[in-house]
Amino acid sequence: MNLGFLASHRGSNMQAVVAACRAGALAANPVVLICNNRSAEALARAEAQGVTAVVLNAATHPDPDMLDSAMLEILQRHGCDVIVLAGFMKKIGPRVLAAYADRIINIHPSLLPKHGGRGMYGRAVHEAVLTAGDHVTGVTVHLVNAEYDEGRILAQGEVPVRPGDTVDALAARVLAQEHAFLVGTLQRIADGRLKIG
């Protein structure tokens, strides 16, 4: 299973997946990263792991349709079977969505459908969890469609909210769960226990 990644910032989930592949804990091959942010840490992470990294954004392709086409061409040229969003902060274009229907995976730092949708990422999600007084949060691995956080849920894992939790403390605990949970879900896809596509 060839994996393509889309990232905008740190790319820590990508690094966890690549490390699992390199260690033989995940039967997959990381082949390419597309990043929309030239200064993203994800680019350095990919380079350090020997994964091809490409910057594509509104500066390289001002026309959204051309950007969508360029992304699709790179993913197909590298033989990507599944695309993993690793903190990608842009909507996926219709060409990529169509070509990879039900093969684009995202991980969200809450138990969807709670605390999902437009603008709900990073600290905003954890702030919403604490504001709501939730006792449990977690991670959701889901398929990506044209709407934010509305694709079919593939797996969910719970993370307790502790008394006195700060946004940073909760975020760190959820992120640690994200890494292991994403790798585990991808392995279930790789060995056929979880069907997508």
Image: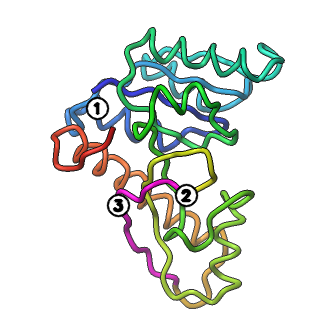
Q: On the image, which quarter does residue 71 sit in?
A: top right
The numbered dot on residue 21 is 1
Q: In this view, does 138 lie above or below 7?
A: below
For marks 2 and 1, give the one nearer the viewer: 2
Mark 1 burial class by Cα count in 10 Å: few <14, some 14-19, many 20+: some
| Residue at image coords 48%, 82% | 136
Q: Nearer the viewer, mark 2 or mark 3?
A: 2
Would you identify the image quadrant in which residue 181 lies?
A: bottom left
Q: What residue type is labelled 2?
A: Glu
Q: Name the residue under label 3.
A: 155
Residue at the limit of the structure toward the top, as seen here: 77
In the rendered structure, which segment of residues is drawn in magenta? 150-161
| Residue drawn at point x = 60 percent, y = 82 percent | 165
Q: Which amino acid does label 3 sit on?
A: Ala
How far apart marks 3 and 1 lie (CA) works out to 20 Å
Q: Reply above or below: 131 against 177.
A: below
Q: What residue type is labelled 1?
A: Cys
Q: What residue is disc 2 on?
A: 150
